[in-house]
Amino acid sequence: MYRRRRKALGVAMVVASLGFHFLTVALYARQPDRFAAFTLFPIWIWGSLGLGLSGLAFVAFRAPLALFATAAWTVSILFMADETRALGRVGLEPLQPGPPARYGGRQVLRVATVNWGASAANFSEGIIRYHPDVIFIQEIPHPYRLRQLNRRLYDGRGDYRYDKRSRCGIVVRGEILHAVRNPTIFRSQQVRARLPNGRSVELVNVHLQASSTDLRLWRRECWRTHRLNRQLRRGELAIALNILEATNRNPRLHEVIIAGDFNAPAGDRIYRSLRPRFLDTFSEAGTGWPNTYHRRFPILRLDHIFASTAFLPVRSRVVSLEESDHRMVVSDLILQ
């Protein structure tokens, strides 16, 4: 009788692990809004629970199919977790501090984005030492910090724009030709800039609605809050894209960079509106740990650089800055 109970308990744990695996994979693949509170977490957090169940079933009860459940979780985490792709690029040339090195004999455009978190500190050398050609900044309290970056990086020969409503700023090595005002929301900033090589590029700086911090998954209100929160961000991004399409001189959206704090983890459903016209530069060419929030213990990748297919991402990395609670994303692009 005792052995039967042990075996039944082991089988129940394996069944629970496999059932939870099927549910988790389905939810992360489909990303339904009503389960936004669940998919907010990286898949490896839920995977660790499933692996714990199947591992315990094997070690304690030698349950049949326990190893199969463990293998299923392991494969799903490796293929679906956002972190594994960048960590697997061991042999790629990493992005280094200093002026951006040429790639394949071609000059690159270095782009950076950082949420400054309304910090009162001056801009750190962490930004300066990477010599970005274009900088997207969110939650910047005052435009004089943009002037400071322009002076330090480009000897004052660059250009910058500050949007008071969104508290977003853009600094470029080049000239800003035109700024587009978003009349409906204050979560984005758009400018047209001319680069030193004479090419023009549309730059869209976004800081979408902050993510809900309610993690009480046992409460129905938590699930409702996360669902509405995601729908609001998706609507804000849709408006920014509609304005971009309406004001961009090239209707095919060539030479466009969209960057900022999307307040949504990598893989979230809202990013589907950007594909396939835009590439996630870190997903394409990033190396190292990708997550940007929180700086001290980064488990979420909220900050992104998306480039239109006129650009080829060749290098990308995430950089920790002591003055911000977000990590900075830096990407090297080739303008094709």
Image (cartoon, helix red, strand yellow):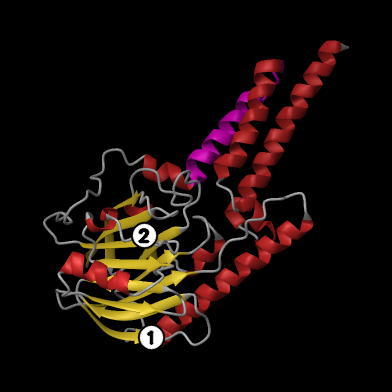
Residue in the picture at 68% in, 56% down = 35
Residue in the picture at 38% in, 54% down = 323
Task: Name the image quarter holding residue 65.
Answer: top right
- Work out whether residue 178 can be spotted: yes
Q: Nearer the viewer, mark 1 or mark 2?
A: 2
Task: Name the image quarter holding residue 18.
Answer: top right
Label 1 sits on residue: 180
Residue 322: x and y, percent?
Answer: 37, 50
Compared across the picture, whether 28 is left or right of 176 comes to: right
**Mark 1–mark 2 contact, CB under 8 Å?**
no
Q: Secondary structure at mark 1?
A: strand
Q: Marks 1/2: CA distance?
A: 29 Å
* Membership of 51 in magenta stretch: no
Q: Amino acid at mark 2?
A: Ala
Point out the stretch of residues depicted in magenta. Answer: 61-81
Quadrant of the frame with the C terminus:
bottom left
Question: Hey, which residue is sitting farthest left in the picture?
Answer: 105
* Res. 121 mark: 2
Residue 215: x and y, percent?
Answer: 67, 51
* Front-lying residue, 1 or 39: 39
Residue in the picture at 56% in, 70% down = 234
Quadrant of the frame with the N terminus:
top right
- Work out whether residue 308 can be spotted: no
Q: Amino acid at mark 1?
A: Val
- Magenta stretch: dominant SS? helix
Question: Hey, which residue is sitting farthest top in the picture?
Answer: 2
Compared across the picture, whether 258 is left or right of 134 comes to: right
182 shown above or below 206: below
